[in-house]
Amino acid sequence: MMRNTIIEILNSINPNVDFSGETSIVNKGYLDSFDIVRLVSLLSDEFDVEFTAAELIPENFNSVDGMIQMIERLKEDS
C-alpha cells in the first residue's frame, strides 16, 4: 500500500516517468529541487512523519524502495 501511495504522489509531480522500478530518480533529474520540496511535504502529510535535514539526501529519494525505508525508519523513531 505504501509503495502504491508513493508512486501516486510521484506521478502527481511528474507523470512522464515510470517511477516503479527507477533507482536514480534524483540523480537522473526526474525531480528538481522544487519537486523534492513538494514531495517531502506530500510524504510528510500522507505518512505523518517529519523529515530532518539529515534525511534530505539523494539516496533516500532515488527510488521508491529508498523512500519506503526512510519513512519506515522515521515512523520507528517517532
Image: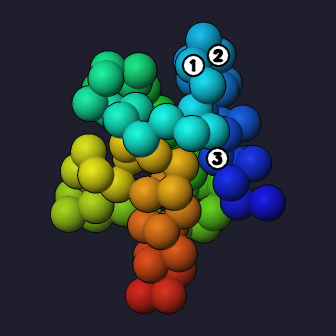
Dot 1 amino acid type: Val
Quarter of the view holding residue 8 = top right
Dot 3 amino acid type: Ile
| Residue 12 x, y percent position in the rendering | 66, 24
> Disc number at residue 17?
1
User: Is residue 75 in view from this perspective?
Assistant: yes
Dot 2 amino acid type: Pro
- Above/below status of 72 relative to 7: below
Between 38 and 28, which is closer to the camera in this rendering?
A: 28
Determine whether the residue tagged by mark 3 lies in a helix, strand or loop.
helix
N-terminal of the two: label 2 or label 3? 3
Q: Which residue is mark 2?
A: 15
User: Is residue 37 in view from this perspective?
Assistant: no
Report whether 34 appears left or right of 19.
left
Mark 2 and mark 1 in contact? Answer it, CB < 8 Å.
Answer: yes
Q: Which residue is mark 3?
A: 6
